Every structure is written in structure tokens, then in C-alpha cells.
Image (spheres, rainbow, N blue to C red):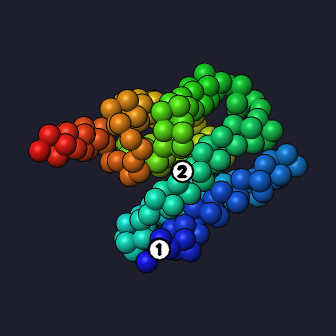
Amino acid sequence: MGEKYFTIPNILSGFRLCSVPVLLILAWTGLEKVYLSLFVIALCTDVADGYLARRLRQESEFGARLDSWGDFSIYLSTPLCAWWLWPHVVLREAPYVAAVLAGFTIPIIAGFLKYRRLTSYHTWGAKLSAVVMSAGTVILFAGGPPWLFRLSTAVLIITQIEELAITAVSPRWRSNVPTLLHALRRNRESRMKGSN
């Protein structure tokens, strides 16, 4: 039987992906509170979709890709929306914003160059980073202190270095690779099977 596409986790990931044009319109028109509300909901779907996929046994390659595209879209649109809504915050936090953008895009480019597709590792570090980065970003946008956003930038850079390492050691595309150690173990097991 074929892969199921209309699952709860995929619907949540699809919602996140579809929310991006709405978020862009809300930011462009200056609707800060409505933007922030939808942004928080979209970020919550990022936390929920992976958990539900595992819990409901609805993990799939399509779901991993959809989740990654949802993440990619949200993360790439957020700096632009922030610039339209809170340019003073973006200017003040410019080194951190630049680090986040570089840290997020470099592993994606590396994955596209090697596999010709978006990586969908969903590492444990990336999950932690997403939660911390989401909280830090929402607090920053809501006018709170920047320390959590700055800390989350460091966490993101560390997790993205791990993703680059996974891409470097993995001969073929795989989704849902929890850690670099898992990728190394899979490679060793593949080599052992190949030599038998």
C-alpha cells in the first residue's frame, strides 16, 4: 500500500507552509499582533508535527520533506517580516540575524549540492534549536529582552555544524537522522554489509 499523504502531521506541516504568504502579507501591512499570533501558531505546528508523526506512527519520507519545506519557508520569511515590522530590532540584532541566516542556509545549500534536495535530518539538536530559537524570536518580537534569541543563535550554529557533518559523512540522502553518531553508525553498518 502506498504512502499516506493526508495525515495529521502532514496537515500541520502543510498549514505551516501555507501560513508563510499570509505572514508576509500581515507583516507588509503592519499588523504586528495578528502577525505574531499566526507566527506563534505556525511555530507550534513545527513542534507538534514531528511529535505526532512519531506518536501516531505516521512518519514518512513525504512528511519529512513537507516538514522541512515548512521550516525552510518560515525561517527564510521571518527576517523579512521582522524587517517590515520591527526594523529597529533587526538593526540592533543584525550580527545575530546574519548568523542565523548563514547558519540556516549553508547546510541547506550543502545538502542541495550533494543530494539535489532539501535535507530532512530532524536531528535532536535541530529540535532543541527550533524550540529555543522560536521562544527567543517570539520574546524578541514581543518587545522582551534579546538574551534568549542571542543564546538560541549559538545553539543553532552548533546544530547546523552537526548537520553539515552529517551531510559530509552520508553518501546518500536520508531523512530523520537523530545525530551525527547515528549517521556514522549507519555508514559503518552499510560498509559491513557491503563487505560480506
Residue type marked 2:
Ser
Tell me which residue sits at (48%, 43%) in the image.
Answer: 119
Residue 32 placed where, x, y %?
Answer: 78, 50
Residue type marked 1:
Gly
Tell me which residue sits at (54%, 43%) in the image.
Answer: 117
User: Residue 53 is drawn in which quadrant?
Assistant: bottom left
* Residue 147 visible, this orientation: no
Spatial separation of the CA atoms under disc 1 and disc 2: 21 Å
Mark 2 = which residue?
68
Check the image and report above or below for 101 versus 70. above
Residue 94 placed where, x, y %?
Answer: 65, 24
Q: Give the camera-side residue of 142 and 155.
A: 155
Residue 155 placed where, x, y %?
Answer: 43, 34
Along the horizontal axis of the image, is 93 left or right of 1?
Answer: right
Mark 1 = which residue?
2
Tell me which residue sits at (64%, 48%) in the image.
Answer: 74
Q: How crowded is mark 2: few (under 14 residues within 10 Å), some or many (20 or more)?
A: many
Tell me which residue sits at (46%, 59%) in the image.
Answer: 61
